[in-house]
Image (cartoon, rainbow, N blue to C red):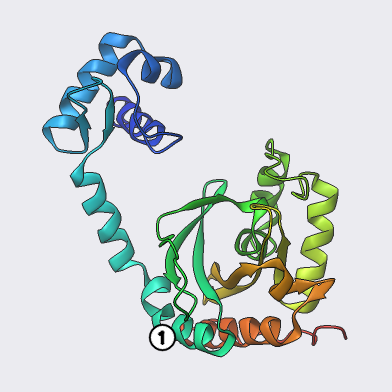
Amino acid sequence: MIQSVERAAQILRALTSESGRLGVTELSERVGLAKGTVHGLLRTLEAHELVEQDPETGKYRLGVAALQLGNAYLENNELRGRSLLWADSLASRTQEAVRVGVLNGSDVLVVHHVFRPDNSVQILEVGAAIPWHACALGKAIVANIDARHQRQLLAAPLLKLTGRTLVSAAELEAEFTRIERFGFATDDQEAIVGEAGIAAPVFDHRGVVGAIGITGPVERLIDNEPNPLISVAVRDTARGLTRDLGGARLTFREAGA
């Protein structure tokens, strides 16, 4: 790898975390480089509008060019493009919000989000990153990746976001078995208290490429057991999207079988 490019990438990744505004000293500590080196890299990134400096605090944040790159990624992401109509249909069918996500490191990146079709105030989540183990989207994807990659993710430290977040390898492996059996994953207040999710994996001809699912109040999605109407709708949608992407036809047992 080219060292200067790798270092610049580390700085950009550091600026995506937490507040997204970091000073030279903070960045130096995060990426393990001398302050002079970090400052030089920041000046270069700033010249290309990938970062910008806050004139009041002197701290750096991602620049407009980073947004343009992100938008270009979304526009060219085949899963997102293929999922637009399917996600709209799923939201109409269930009257709940729909998210489409892909695995990005140890997080799920939301690449498409359809609001719940009512008049409530909602926040667009496209671009949000959620720890894979704390959401149905992530568990649906990781249950279907290759065994080596799966072991790496399970071996890494897993953050407990709520009292219900699953963080042990044994618990998550049991989830994978259930996902394989029923064809969908759930999260029960594992990322946000009061919120639940139901998601199913999406495949192309190479394997799993992401997941599509519903998120909403726990009492509507999971009341002791996953809502059967929603889980079937999610699974049917994932199958249709898989066919659109050229993936194999999926056959899962019916929930409760």
Q: Nearer the viewer, residue 13 or 99?
A: 99
Disc 1 secondary structure class: helix
The residue indicated by pointer 1 is 85
Please provide percent x and percent y for residue 157: 69, 35
Please provide percent x and percent y for residue 63: 22, 40
Q: Nearer the viewer, residue 191 or 75?
A: 191
Q: Is residue 38 left or right of residue 231?
A: left
Please provide percent x and percent y for residue 112: 42, 68
**Extreme-left residue of the structure:** 47
What is the quadrant of the C terminus in the image?
Answer: bottom right
- Residue sitting at x 59%, y 85%: 94
- Residue sitting at x 76%, y 71%: 222
Q: Is residue 4 above or below residue 122?
A: above
The answer to which image quadrant residue 115 occupies is bottom left
The answer to which image quadrant residue 146 occupies is bottom right
Q: Residues within 10 Å of mark 1 (few under 14, many from 20)?
A: few
Instruction: State the count of labels.
Output: 1
Please provide percent x and percent y for residue 8: 30, 30
- Residue sitting at x 45%, y 53%: 128
Q: Is residue 225 above or below residue 130?
A: below
Q: Is residue 20 above or below residue 95?
A: above
**Extreme-right residue of the structure:** 257
Q: Is residue 218 left or right of residue 216?
A: right
Q: Nearer the viewer, residue 63 or 182?
A: 63
What is the quadrant of the N terminus in the image?
Answer: top left
Q: Is residue 21 left or right of residue 54?
A: right
Q: Is residue 109 above or below residue 87?
A: above
Residue type of the residue flagged with mark 1: Leu
- Residue sitting at x 65%, y 82%: 235
Q: Is residue 225 left or right of residue 114?
A: right
